[in-house]
Amino acid sequence: MNIAVFFGGKNTEHDVSIITGQLVISGLKDLGHTVYPVYISKEGKWYISEKMDNVEFFKNPNIKLEGEVNLNFAQNQNGKIAFKTKGLFSSKEYNIDLAFPALHGRNGEDGTIQGLFELLNIPYVGCDVVSSAIAMDKALTKLFYQRFNFPTTKFVAFDNSRWENDRKALLTEIKTTLPWPVFVKPARLGSSIGMTKVKSEEDLDLAIEVALHYDNKVLVEESVEDLMDITVVILGNENPKYSLIQESTYSKDFFSYEDKYLNDGGAQLGNAEKSIVIPARLDDKTTKEIQEMAKEIYELMELSGTARVDFLYNKIYKKYYANEINTLPGTLYHHLWKQSGVSLSELLKTLVDLAIERKSKENRLTFTFESTILKSANSNKLQLKGQDS
């Protein structure tokens, strides 16, 4: 099968996506697939080239990108797409059977590229347009939790317009609704970028301004103290299964970008062994409750392929709160699946099979409807009032 792996992206998680993309490319090649790396630059340009199949290629500060893609939506034929590279005298064509997005954050994990794959009528790995968009928005995710009575922390969400026009009332609402300390986050960003733990009212304005630098929507939520940061990954379409629970330790007030990706190789990448505890130090009853809740959240939000569901656990009061959902975890959280008895090759094979299964079911649907509405339409009535005929 010819599989295109999409990575990079015009967002703050660009570099993390390169690492995930290279892992996926290598693993799919080991399964015998023909793999085409599709790199999206920070400027939003698309490139396709077999040369981009290793991390070392992207470490070169003077990187020379080749194979810029000439996007042509008319190229779709029978559930396949053909990418043609730009060239003055010659171009190369790549025929693709399946898309594997290894993108994180905005323009990759938020339903946008999933929508493109839908328009191109090609099977793709992972969650669909709607579930990706909801899960990407932390405020919408928390409203979803409230709708289905999942425990979650108190919060206030607002956009840049409200902050500019009604700042005083908004600050009063935050101070009277939420206990201190609070977390201020960009609502549609990941990897703890732009996030601040605020311990006093004096620092709240600045934290909000920082968050608004990355997104025009902000979430302010109460902090869970005496915290254990835990996560579960889920795999499947119908009848999904869950992993063991991972506990992540950290060096600051919260699980920072440095803890996730830099310190000791990065806990989110599965490398910082000192920062990862698998399985998490929870009793059996609590472990089962959290795993089952993660699975229920996955099913109710109609997630598919794979996703990571994060929880906050107060070690003193032994209470847990559903936190964020990540519809394409960094490096697919293959380290946690490995500890749970699922190898990388098995994980990738399953994700490809799930994408094909979903597309096969969609192909059974009818997307058109024969109507006589145009024949019966009165063209005179459709004229704009006052418009010359």
Image: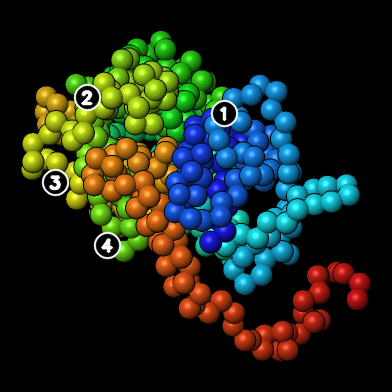
Q: How far apart are marks 4 and 2 (CA)?
A: 31 Å
Q: In this view, does 28 lie to the left or right of 14?
A: left
Report x, y in % for residue 250. Answer: 30, 20
Q: Quadrant of the C terminus?
A: bottom right
Q: Name the residue under label 3.
A: 288
Rendered position, 4 above or below 173: below
In the foreground, 115 or 343: 343
| Residue occupying image coordinates x 39% and y 22% | 265
Which residue, given by chain and number where applicable, does mark 4 sit on? Answer: 239
Residue 303: tell me if it is visible. Answer: no
**Are circles 3 and 1 on residues that touch, CB within 8 Å?**
no
Does 82 sit above or below residue 27?
Answer: below
**Which tag is nearer the camera, tag 3 or tag 2?**
3
Q: Residue at x 55, y 48 (%)?
A: 5
Inspect the image, locate mark 1, and give the three-letter code of the amino acid beneath it: Glu
| Nearer-the-camera pick, 285 or 150 | 285
Which numbered disc covers residue 56?
Answer: 1
Quick check: 228 left or right of 371?
A: left
Measure the C-alpha gap from mark 3 to mark 2.
19 Å
The picture quadrant where one finds residue 202 is: top left
Q: In this view, does 123 lie to the left or right of 311?
A: right
Amino acid type of disc 2? Leu
Q: What residue type is labelled 4?
A: Asn
Residue under label 2, please give it: 227
Vertical relation: 267 (above or below) 127:
above
Disc 4 from disc 3: Cα separation:
17 Å
Task: Spot the residue most to the right.
Answer: 388
